[in-house]
Image (cartoon, rainbow, N blue to C red):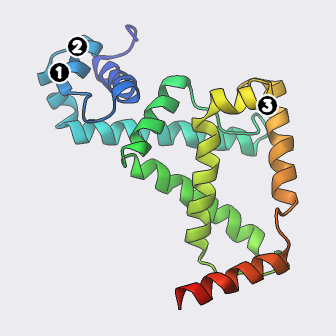
Amino acid sequence: MSDLTAKARIREAAMELIGEVGYERATTRAIAERAGVTSGLIRHHYGSKEGLLATCDDRVIHLIIEQEAKARSGQVSSLHLPVPYRMYLARALFDGRAAAVFDHMVTVAEAWMSATDATRPDPTDLPLRARATVQTAFALSVGMLVPHVSRGLGADITQPDGERLLMRVLLDLYSHPLITPEAAREHGEQVQQHDH
């Protein structure tokens, strides 16, 4: 981190510290100490701790957009953030923060679902945004649980062999419903009856 500008060091230090202890415990003083700067420099560059957090979120979104572009060009098949960014995002989301990151991913999921809905044999009356939100939560959980998923698969999903296995498992899960359409309708009717 020493070769970064002071402004970038502050951002990286904030992301590391928030990933380790959470937003509330990552004080501006602790962030300044980690970055090797004064608290006043944080105010100078970011205005406030909230301003710094917004910049951290923007950095993660930028990395996600880069990964999405690589995925579209076939360079990678899934999203993998570096560990400090993944830890930051996991902790920030758990703390109810990083809304801009989550919302960006939901918007991307909406675009993907909208395209696939056009050829869907069983149209749904569920809102696109609701489905994209749940899909995003599912997708994020794999990225946030890399050590556990890798252990369960017996392969590191950040490496090519593990990534291929993960993709095969996901393709199998998404292409084979866990319940039949009839069972889903029956369960849906039971839920509606229970609500009334």
Residue that lies at the very extreme toward the left in this rendered image: 40
* Residue placed under numbered mark 3 in the picture: 153
Foreground pick, 146 / 5: 146
Q: Are marks 2 and 1 in contact (CB under 8 Å)?
A: yes
Mark 1 packing: few (<14 Cα in 10 Å), some, or many (20+)? some
Quadrant assignment, res 53:
top left
Residue 120 vs residue 27: left or right?
Answer: right
* Residue placed under numbered mark 1 in the picture: 29
Amino acid, disc 2: Glu
**Where is residue 109 shown, x and y percent of the image?**
63, 59
Quadrant assignment, res 82:
top right
Mark 2 packing: few (<14 Cα in 10 Å), some, or many (20+)? some
Q: How many marks?
A: 3
Q: Secondary structure at mark 2?
A: helix
Going from N to C along the chain, the mark reached first, 3 or 1, is 1
- Residue found 58% across the figure and 31% down from its top: 81
Mark 3 packing: few (<14 Cα in 10 Å), some, or many (20+)? some
- Residue found 87% across the figure and 51% down from its top: 172
Foreground pick, 63 / 79: 79
Foreground pick, 74 / 167: 167
**Where is residue 49 shown, x and y percent of the image?**
21, 36
Amino acid, disc 1: Arg
Residue 180 vertical placement versus 36 (above, below)? below
Foreground pick, 195 / 158: 195
Nearer the viewer's eye, disc 2 or disc 3? Answer: 3
**Where is residue 50 shown, x and y percent of the image?**
24, 42
- Residue found 84% across the figure and 80% down from its top: 182
Quadrant assignment, res 185:
bottom right
- Residue found 84% across the figure and 64% down from its top: 177
* CA–CA distance in space, label 2 to label 1: 6 Å
